[in-house]
Image (cartoon, rainbow, N blue to C red):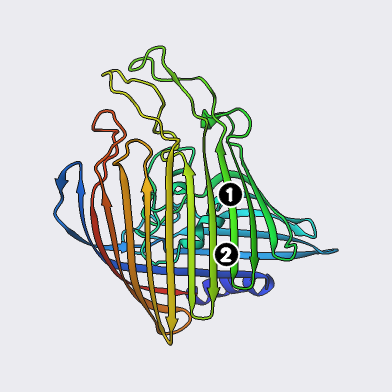
Amino acid sequence: MLALAVASALTIPVAAQADTILYGSARVSVDYNDETLDSVDIDGTWDVVNNSSRLGVVGSEDLGGGLSAVYRYEFGVDVTEGGNWESNRPKYVGLKGGFGTLTLGTQDTPYYNVAGITDIFNSGKTFLYPQWLGGGFSLSGNRSQADGDLVRLSNSVYYSTPDFNGFSGEAMLVMDGPSSNISNNVDIWNLAAKYSNGPFFAGVSYIKLEGKSNVPLNPDTLPGVTFDLDLSNWVLGLGYNSGPFSVGFIYEQGSLYSLNLFTGIKNAAGTQFFPGDDATNWYLTGQYVFGNNTVRAAYGQLDTGVDGDDKIDNYVVGYQYNFSKRTSVWAEYIGRSASLYNVPGDSSTGLFMGDQNAVSIGTRVDF
């Protein structure tokens, strides 16, 4: 009787709200990862990995006169180790009409909606900060997000225009009040212009962190020293998708670490921090589908802008077999070749990177 009562309670709201859709995606893999960090060759490890599995609801309500309310509430679901409901996946509410769409909440950026043309693989290791500059642009200024969790910005207002014969525009403002310690007004603003017609896609986006010019640091470690938080990135994205073949390309330039590189400042030990506004990145992806099979490949190079030799070469190859439109298995290889570099400072805060070889074998079920 208890099971029947619970089932009834869950079913009645869904029936009454026919425009609400429950959806999700379970993505789990067995990964082997072998890295060299800070000149140390770390022994390869095996792990069962969650790859941004999620559960959400999305829907709309017709308000009449061509106006509708739209909403989305999506949670990260870690099917391997718990930690559910704790990701920055999209959550927003807003209005849609002839003027376009206006939403508020935690949302993908216009920047990602351009750069994401090259986000085609399954493993969470295949589109992180070594592959795209925008992967690290956030108020937090760190790399604490889980593998595969792309940066979405909370406290955001998002506007997208209607489609004008393939042309559209998007804008985002992030306003986090005094808690961000970045700005008293708009903390981040992001613009994008896109063209999508048939097999062709082209887009450009610019994102800017409007930081205070003089933010006092910890007086115990850096007395009387301030730094500048005004940082930015821009990206150009191109895509072509015709029949079984598709290709995507992005070129980026800007700040490699949003809040971790401070120009011309020394820490208490006298270590110089380096500028991070001259980083560049390009990334090329391709995909071919035949029958139930899909093969993918990607190659790109990120130049840190710190030193002429500090470049990161990224290469990925993958195979996917589709049992149906919703269920598939994959095998992907992720490689990284990098000259060792770091954000100078003490070892507890420095960022080090070297070569990486990883293999991901997983399964994905969408519903």
Q: What amino acid does circle 2 point to?
A: Val
Q: Position of residue 43 (x, y in %)?
A: 13, 54
Task: Kindly indicate whether the residue at mark 2 contacts the one at mark 1 (C-beta within 8 angstroms).
Answer: no
Does any portion of residue 5 appear in the rendered image?
Answer: no
Does any portion of residue 141 appear in the rendered image?
Answer: yes
Left or right: 111, with 135 as reference point? right
- Image-quadrant location for residue 124: bottom left
Q: Nearer the viewer, residue 338 or 86?
A: 338
Q: Position of residue 295 (x, y in %)?
A: 38, 76
Is residue 223 placed above or below 303 in the rendered structure? above
Q: Which residue is label 2 attached to?
A: 57
- SS under mark 1: strand
Mark 1 Cα-neighbour bin, 10 Å: few <14, some 14–19, many ≥20 = many
Query: Is tag 1's residue or tag 2's residue first in the polypeptide sequence?
Result: 2
- Image-quadrant location for residue 268: top left
Q: Nearer the viewer, residue 315 or 57?
A: 315
For image coordinates 58% across by 45% down, the residue present is 206
Q: Nearer the viewer, residue 185 or 65?
A: 185
- Image-quadrant location for residue 328: bottom left
